[in-house]
Amino acid sequence: MKKILIVEDDLASEMMLEIMIEDFCKFPLIAIDGLEAVRICKENPDIDIVLMDIKLPELNGYEATKKIREFNKDIIIIAQTSYAFPDDREKSITAGCNDYISKPYNQSDLTELLKKWTKNIMIL
């Protein structure tokens, strides 16, 4: 099992993500804004993956990613956004994200993305 942080300010989206990732992580950490995401990453350097919403209160996902990269270069950060502009992927990568997924996405899209960024996943 991997240690995953879900950064999502929408409760319904957060709950959906928890269900979608349960083959990878049974008890994900949750942050509802960018400031909380940075704090949780500092306190938990063993997090494997961050699913980072981009549109967040307090500190958006781009800025939170930049702050996380100041102290953790290895963590996998996947931007997730309902913005559908062509340059969003590039903007996410430039901010320090490893990858990008556009909302709405389905279970298979997310599973393939998580498999891409993880090794030796034990699927129960």
Image (cartoon, grey):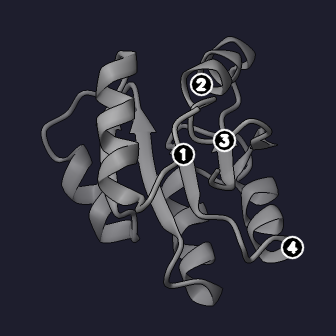
Q: Which residue is mark 1?
A: 51
Q: Residues within 10 Å of mark 1 (few under 14, many from 20)?
A: many
Q: In the image, what residue occupies the spot 52% across and 37% down?
A: 123
Asked whether 39 or 2 is in front, the reply is 2
Residue under the image location 41 percent in, 33 percent down: 81
At mark 1, the secondary structure is strand
As drawn, the label of residue 17 is: 2
- The numbered mark at residue 43 is 4
* Amino acid type of the residue tagged 1 in the rendering: Leu
SS at mark 2 in the image: helix
CB atoms of marks 3 and 1 within 8 Å: no
Dot 4 or dot 2, earlier in sequence = 2
Q: Amino acid at mark 4?
A: Glu
User: For this rendering, which residue is in front, 121 or 52?
Assistant: 121
Marks 1 and 2: in contact by CB < 8 Å? yes
Identity of the amino acid at label 3?
A: Cys
Gap between marks 3 and 2 measured at Cα: 11 Å
**Residue 46, quarter of picture:** bottom right
